[in-house]
Structures are given as structure tokens and as C-alpha cells.
Image (cartoon, rainbow, N blue to C red):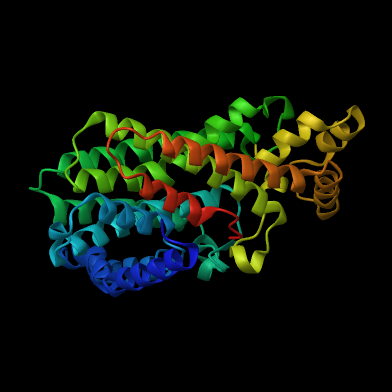
Amino acid sequence: MANCSNMAQISKEENREMMAIWPDIVQDITEAARNLNIPDVAKWMEKVSQYTVPKGKKLRGLTLIKVYKSLVSNDQLTEDNIRLVQILAWCVELMQTYILVLDDIQDHSLLRRGQPCWHLYSNVGEAAVNDGVLLESAMYYIIRKHFKGKECYVNLVETFQDIIFKTLMGQCMDLYSSNFGKKPNLDLFTIDRHNTIIEIKTAYYTYVLPTFAAMHFAGIKNPEMFRQAKIIALEIGHMFQVQDDYLDCFGDTEICGKNGIDIQDGKCTWLIVVALQRATFEQRKILEECYGVADPEKIKRVKKLFIDLDLPKIYSIYEEEKYNMTNTRIQQISCGLPQSIFFDLLRTIYHRTS
């Protein structure tokens, strides 16, 4: 198994290789507008793409590339196949960006990837809704352009469609749980509801999508391989989102690249669910008064209560237990998938700070 420094080096190299084809992706994104002889739209789509897509960590795209390279033999790692898998990785990044652009509008977010959210940039405003959907359409255009006629094409399109549908339903559940920006009903904040939101809003598109897309492109047909891969991918995705919940409150904005707003937005997060499980009657009253309110003093009271309830320590214990449990699950893979794929993915997020 590769050590952490080797894995980080591999990620940096793959990131550089992904970025090397980014100009070609931009050309693909704007191609349809240029073909329709609407240069203003082509220029705008390039601006949207350059601002929103390439500046993230590319976790999902790099996951797809790593999984593919682990699944196929060296003779399949041709220049053409590597380029195609990088294009597919950018499609995953386009899918994520489409979701984030809309999510940031709905959540009234200020920062994304260390810069103002797209809807706040240069008075873009609600036009960002159309820009987000443009990114999704561009993603399908690119998949069709490069993969139509290949055996994996239909499976790729259906996988993207299915997981986008799940993610949007997860977003609906998330917004419903937070009462669409109004004062939330804390009685709804159960561990079961939180686990469901994590699974369908985050885990599917963060780990199942890149894993399945890589498997389809690698020509894997065995349903049992997909079943076992999904189980592990969802486990890793669960850990990833709980980390996100924790970092939203206790992470460093400079490192995370976004401002934490879960408390004021009244989100159903791991922190509030565990806090409600541990809170005394008086502490619950504080949460009912302060949680989901955009008042700096009330946000401070919630954070202080989280600390009083020892949630940072409980989170640290949770992360360790989740890491060990997922390691055990990976060791139980029996379908022929390389266990090393998932060990590497798990180690990539272990103790992450952004």
C-alpha cells in the first residue's frame, strides 16, 4: 500500500495532467455555442467555466482516474484511454460544480474555493441558476462527443443521470430539514435522517459516481463488483460528509476555502444531531432559541455549546472508529476488486483539514 506522501505526490501529478487538458475541455464546453454562431454566449460560458470549475481539489475527478488505473492492465493505459478517463474526470467535476453553483444560491453562501460564490461575482445574481444548468448540459455534451459509440456510453449516461437525480433529492431533503431557510424543527434532526441526507446528497456523487464511471469505462460487467464497490464507496462518503459537517463549524476558512454557515442555515448536520442526543433540557432550549438564526451572538452560543458538550473530542473518536470500521469492510471485499483502491481513497481523507 502506498504511503501518504507517495499518494500525495501521485495526486499532484495526476492533478497537473488533468489541468493540462483543461483548455480542451473549455473548447468542448463552448463548442455548441460557437457552432450556433453565438460568440457572446460562448464567451460567457468560458467565463463561467474558468471561474467555477478548475479551482477545487478535484477529489472526485482524481478518484475516477485512480480507480480506473487500478482496474485495468498496463496495456490498456494507452495515451487515448488516459485522455478519455481524464475527460470523464472533468465531467464529474462539471457535475459537482453544477450542483455547487445552485447549492450556494439556495444556502446564501459567500465563499466557494477561496473566492466569492459565482452568484455573488460581478452581480451575476440569479442568472447563476441558468449558468449552473449550462454546466450540466455541457457535461452531457462532452460525454456524448467523446464516448458515443463506445460500449460504455449508455451505462455512463445512465450512471450520471441516476446519481444527479439522487443528489437533487438529497438537496431537497436537506432544504426541507432546514425548513427552507426558516427556523428549523429540531425534532426532525435524527441520526436516521442525517444518514439518509449524507448518503443521497453527498456519498453517491462523491464516491459512487467516480467509482462506477471508472468501472464502466474499464469494461467491468460483474454486478457483484458494483454491489460491493457501492457499499464501500458509501461508507467512505459517509465519513467524508461528517468531516465536512465538523469542518464547517471548526475548520479554518483559509484552509477550507469556504465560510461555515451550517449553524445559521439550520442544517441537519452531524454536530447538531449529536448535540441534541447529549443536551440537557436547558441546553436544548439554547439550541431551539439559537440554531438556524443568522445572529453572530447566537451562532457563538451554539458553537460554545458544541464545545461544552465535548463534540470535538467525540468527533475525533468517531473519525477513528469510522476509519477502522471501513478498513475492515474493505478487507472483506471478495469479488475480485483490488482492495488497494479503497484503502487509498480512505487514506486520502483520513484526518483531512479541508
- Badge count: 0
- The answer to whether residue 117 is left or right of residue 301 is left
Picture coordinates of residue 148 (x, y %)?
11, 49
Q: Quadrant of the C terminus?
A: bottom right
Measuring 58% from the left and 65% from the top, which residue is drawn there?
Answer: 257
Picture coordinates of residue 2 (x, y %)?
42, 60
Measuring 26% from the left and 63% from the top, which residue is drawn there?
Answer: 29
Picture coordinates of residue 113 (x, y %)?
53, 65
- Residue most extreme to the left: 149
Up-down relation of residue 175 to residue 347 (above or below): above
Nearer to the camera, 53 or 9: 9
Residue 322 visible to the viewer: yes
Measuring 28% from the left and 69% from the top, which residue is drawn there?
Answer: 26
Nearer to the camera, 347 or 79: 347
- The answer to whether residue 200 is left or right of residue 140 is right
Up-down relation of residue 251 to residue 270 (above or below): below
Q: Quadrant of the N terminus?
A: bottom left
Nearer to the camera, 233 or 38: 233
Residue 167 visible to the viewer: no
Up-down relation of residue 177 to residue 31 (above or below): above
Up-down relation of residue 339 to residue 69 (above or below): above
